[in-house]
Amino acid sequence: MSEFLQYLASTKNGDERIPPLADLSQELGVSIAILREQLEVARALGLVEVKPKTGIRRLAYTFKPAVKQSLTYAVQTNQGYFSLFADLRKHLEEAYWLEAVILLDSQDLNLLRSYIRRAREKLGGIPIQIPHAEHREFHLSIYRHLNNPFVIGLLESYWELYEAVGLDVYTDFNYLQNVWNYHEKMVDTICIGDFSAGFRALSDHMKLLQERSRQAPNQKFE
């Protein structure tokens, strides 16, 4: 690791102010120019934020920024990488399904039902709206209580990549209806404790998404 990353790793977890680069330069024995380069790497990794009035602040660790940087580059070089990452996401959600759903409480289930309700309203409106935000939050909310930043970071990165390849603007109405039918079945089965049936609904739903991934339009990231 760079000197700056080593310094961050040695400090306490959480959000805290970092000394100015001039002070760090003396403390670490590294030039300010080199520290600025190392600071930019830390910013890209989501480890720190820099603001004019508050200076440099250390942020709580999250895996998504590092994954997003790599995925963005990968899919720019080869759109086929999205299908590979989508397959990883499928296996990840399936592998953590039981561990995740047993952590859901009544408030969580009500939230999931609210996403379903809002999605139905959008699909039944004039004009029809694509319930992409609800789709994203529905899935992420199921796994939100997992105490694993790496799983959460991978799942969050999937949805950002999903948007980048254009799947959030897909307009097949029958497909969207089927998606939310599966979502409703997943919640219904969780509510009665039939987690196996919920898992089957999740797996069937994933088959729809895999088919879409193969049909995603070719477009470049902005």
Image (cartoon, helix red, strand yellow):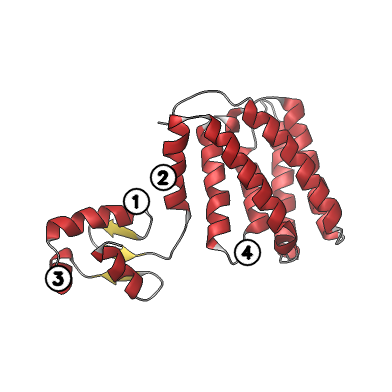
Camera sees residue 129: no
Mark 1 or 3, nearer chain start: 3
Dot 1 amino acid type: Ala
Say which residue appears at 62% left-offset and 38% top-offset.
132
Dot 4 amino acid type: Leu
In this rendering, the label closer to the viewer, 3 or 2: 2
* Residue 171 picture quarter: top right
Residue 33 spot, x, y in % from top left: 13, 55
Residue 218 spot, x, y in % from top left: 52, 23
Which residue in the structure is indicated by mark 2? Answer: 69
**Cα distance between the residues tagged 2 and 1:** 8 Å
Say which residue appears at 69% left-offset and 58% top-offset.
96
Which residue in the structure is indicated by mark 3? Answer: 23
Which residue in the structure is indicated by mark 4? Answer: 146
In this rendering, the label closer to the viewer, 2 or 4: 2
Q: Tags 2 and 1 in contact by the CB under 8 Å rule?
A: yes
**Cα distance between the residues tagged 3 and 2:** 30 Å
Dot 2 amino acid type: Gln
**Cα distance between the residues tagged 1 and 4:** 25 Å
| Along the viewing direction, whichever of 90 and 169 lies nearer the viewer | 90
Q: Is residue 171 toward the left or the right of residue 55 in the image?
A: right
Q: Is residue 124 toward the left or the right of residue 169 in the image?
A: right
| Along the viewing direction, whichever of 50 and 203 lies nearer the viewer | 203
Mark 3 or 2, nearer chain start: 3
